[in-house]
């Protein structure tokens, strides 16, 4: 008799960190869980590459290349992972301070400038297919810091364009997300998770009171 083995269903990282922007998704890889503790989706370099591929920050071929690089050079992979975690702390502080209307500490801005300077070394102006000259990443596909470069570039774009003003923080889990709704009245990171949990909690409280 044929039996199909049911594989455990694993939530793709995309659903756990979807803030509508790669820099926010990256910050959301460290978040509150439902029991009041914290979960960190990034535990080593491999998990960083997995997350980057699942959230479409990098494509499948790029992720395979980075997996190979990481396997061939574990110390460098560990260094890239630590650099990424430290950058995540910087971005977390920077955007949370901006959202809360607090002055961003000069040391946080210094750290972001350092990270951004690394990224800028890999940018070149080139003529695109439409004839327009724009800044493009140059020769970074096999660089083990590729996910981080793309994240920092995205964070810089949020700051440069003023789009950071559309960022909101979910009151339930603390995730950051872009509120692109027409009325700018989105409250939860996801109506299906945090939104529905809060609604059922309110319903339970009302029932208790009644
Ligand atoms: Zn949430």
Image: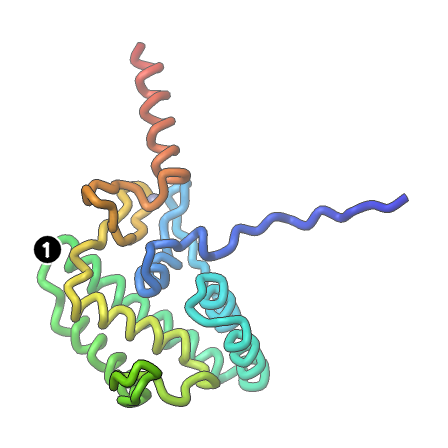
Give the quarter of the image for residue 199.
Answer: top left
Q: Which residue is mark 1?
A: 101
Image check: 88 left or right of 184?
right
Q: Residue furthest top?
A: 210
Q: Residue at x 21, y 61 (%)?
A: 95
Q: Residue at x 16, y 73 (%)?
A: 109
Q: Where, quadrant-wise, is the N terminus in this rendering? A: top right
Give the quarter of the image for residue 183.
Answer: top left
Q: Give SS at disc 1.
A: loop
**Residue 167, x across and y down, in percent:** 22, 54
- 207 is higher (above) or lower (below) than 4: above
Q: Nearer the viewer, residue 182 or 188?
A: 182
Q: Residue at x 31, y 17 (%)?
A: 206
**Residue 140, x across and y down, in percent:** 41, 86
How does the figure colour the protein chain or chains? rainbow
Give the quarter of the image for residue 92.
Answer: bottom left
Image check: 61 left or right of 181?
right
**Residue 39, x across and y down, in percent:** 42, 53
Q: Nearer the viewer, residue 160 or 29?
A: 160
Image check: 114 left or right of 136?
left
Q: Residue furthest front?
A: 130
The image shows a total of numbered marks equal to 1
**Residue 112, x across and y down, in percent:** 22, 75
Q: Nearer the viewer, residue 96 or 139?
A: 139
Q: Residue at x 29, y 53 (%)?
A: 177
Label 1, residues with CA under 10 Å away: few <14, some 14-19, many ≥20: few
- 163 is higher (above) or lower (below) than 134: above
Q: Where, quadrant-wise, is the C terminus in this rendering? A: top left
Which image quadrant shows ligand 1?
Answer: top left
């Amino acid at each position: 008799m044929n039996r199909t083995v049911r594989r455990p269903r694993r939530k793709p990282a995309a659903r756990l960190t979807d803030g509508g922007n790669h820099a926010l998704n990256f910050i959301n890889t460290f978040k509150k869980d439902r029991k009041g503790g914290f979960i960190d989706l990034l535990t080593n370099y491999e998990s960083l590459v997995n997350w980057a591929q699942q959230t479409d920050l990098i494509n499948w071929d790029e992720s395979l290349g980075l997996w190979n690089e990481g396997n061939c050079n574990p110390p460098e992979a560990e260094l890239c992972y630590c650099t990424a975690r430290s950058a995540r702390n910087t971005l977390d502080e920077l955007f949370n301070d901006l959202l809360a209307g607090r002055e961003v500490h000069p040391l946080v801005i210094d750290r972001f400038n350092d990270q951004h300077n690394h990224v800028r070394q890999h940018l070149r102006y080139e003529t695109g297919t439409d004839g327009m000259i724009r800044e493009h990443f140059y020769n970074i596909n096999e660089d083990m810091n590729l996910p981080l470069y793309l994240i920092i570039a995205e964070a810089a774009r949020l700051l440069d364009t003023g789009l950071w003003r559309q960022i909101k923080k979910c009151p339930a889990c603390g995730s950051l997300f872009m509120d692109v709704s027409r009325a700018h009245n989105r409250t939860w990171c996801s109506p299906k998770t945090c939104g529905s949990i809060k609604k059922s909690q309110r319903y339970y409280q009302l029932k208790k009171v009644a």
